[in-house]
Amino acid sequence: MKEKLEKIKMESIKELEGIQNLQQLEEIRIKYLGKKGELTQVLRGMGALTAEERPVVGQLANEIRDYITEKIEETAYCLKRRDLENRLRTEFVDVTMPSRKLEIGNKHPLTKVLDEIKEIFIGMGFTIVEGPEIEKTYYNFDALNHSKYHPARDMQDTFYISEDVLLRTQTSPVQVRTMEKQKPPIRILAPGRVYRADEIDATHSPMFHQIEGLVVDKGITMANLKGTLDVFAKQLYGETTKTKFRPHHFPFTEPSAEMDCTCAACKGEGCRICKYTGWIEILGGGMVHPKVLKKCGIDPEIYSGFAFGMGLDRIAMLKYDIDDLRLMFENDKRFLSQF
């Protein structure tokens, strides 16, 4: 067995001298020192030796194993050193060359307009509030004075998850949840994604964005609503912007109205965007219905309030003269880099 060990030592030395890369070195390590390696097999056969031979052969085997291990480590160091020197000779960096141009991103047009609108209303004392996009039917319809037969409840208009759970069709549920938890005075702005079963085209999408506002306090009147929205329109589109209100119907406000403002593109002169009327509809609102206040635990005999809602996507399209809603969601850098 001593002769076999010496043979293993000599063969390993000879093979290590011809090593060219780390992969070959690993193969030699496995050949001699691995679980099924030649030296390992010899050590496993020591049980057949006599008591006198066993310590002598064991000592020799350990010495040879340590020797081979040391040689492998030395060879590995030399190979790595050689590879590094080769790389230093062949690879270089020309520090005089111009660096790669770093492209700096920019905000999405929807985000830019949303931030601007938030800033306007925060300046008027509003607080930003958010709510769940998966909503209960109660908050989306019942608490907002929608009758059980209102067409908005139909399957073709609303994405239902179950009979009592749906994807919210408006951010109005945030108003209800706020009024349940917080007593007047209330002054909030509720932006967020909403969902309706619309076909995708240039002006419709099953997912879009809404911004709704709510003010509840003593002595709130329609004049407060008109004044607030007039200030908003002037700050968003310019001080020369004019507003007008048209009667409308919403289940959760009474009286209700839609607000138009002078076209930002033509300043009221008439153009393609405003269909040559000089006016563009941008939002709807009205006085909070007494039934809605009562459902939320607020006495309509003491408090009153106003609410309004607008489509963020529409506001952004008008502001930037975008004629196709789908551009907002396609993530085309050629489009987004313009803003």
Image (cartoon, rainbow, N blue to C red):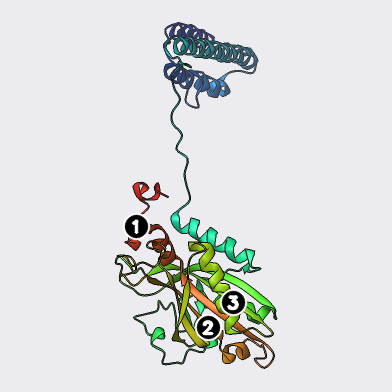
| Identity, as a three-letter code, of the amino acid under mark 1 | Leu
How many numbered marks, from 0 up? 3
Asked if labels 3 and 1 touch by Cβ distance under 8 angstroms, the answer is: no
Left or right: residue 18 versus residue 2 is left
Q: Nearer the viewer, residue 184 or 282?
A: 282
Q: Is residue 176 visible?
A: no
Helix, strand or loop status at disc 2: strand
Q: Measuring 31% from the left and 67% from the top, which residue is drawn there? A: 200
Helix, strand or loop status at disc 1: helix
User: In the rendered image, which residue does mark 2 sit on?
Assistant: 286
Q: What is the crowding at mark 3: few (fewer than 14 residues within 10 Å), some, or many (at least 20)?
A: many
| Identity, as a three-letter code, of the amino acid under mark 3 | Leu
Q: Measuring 48% from the left and 51% from the top, which residue is drawn there? A: 107
Q: What is the crowding at mark 1: few (fewer than 14 residues within 10 Å), some, or many (at least 20)?
A: some
User: In the rendered image, which residue does mark 3 sit on?
Assistant: 214
Spatial separation of the CA atoms under disc 1 and disc 3: 30 Å
Q: Tell me which label, 2 or 3, sits earlier in the chain.
A: 3
Left or right: residue 155 versus residue 292 is left
Helix, strand or loop status at disc 3: strand
Q: Measuring 51% from the left and 62% from the top, which residue is drawn there? A: 236
Give the answer, above or below, for where 325 lies relative to 21: below
Quarter occupied by residue 220: bottom right
User: Residue 302's x, y, as percent?
Assistant: 69, 90
Asked if labels 3 and 2 touch by Cβ distance under 8 angstroms, the answer is: no
Q: Nearer the viewer, mark 1 or mark 2?
A: 2
Q: Nearer the viewer, mark 2 or mark 3?
A: 2
Spatial separation of the CA atoms under disc 1 and disc 2: 32 Å
Q: Nearer the viewer, residue 223 or 27?
A: 223
Q: Tell me which label, 1 or 3, sits earlier in the chain.
A: 3
User: In the rendered image, which residue does mark 1 sit on?
Assistant: 327
Give the answer, above or below, for where 39 lies relative to 213: above
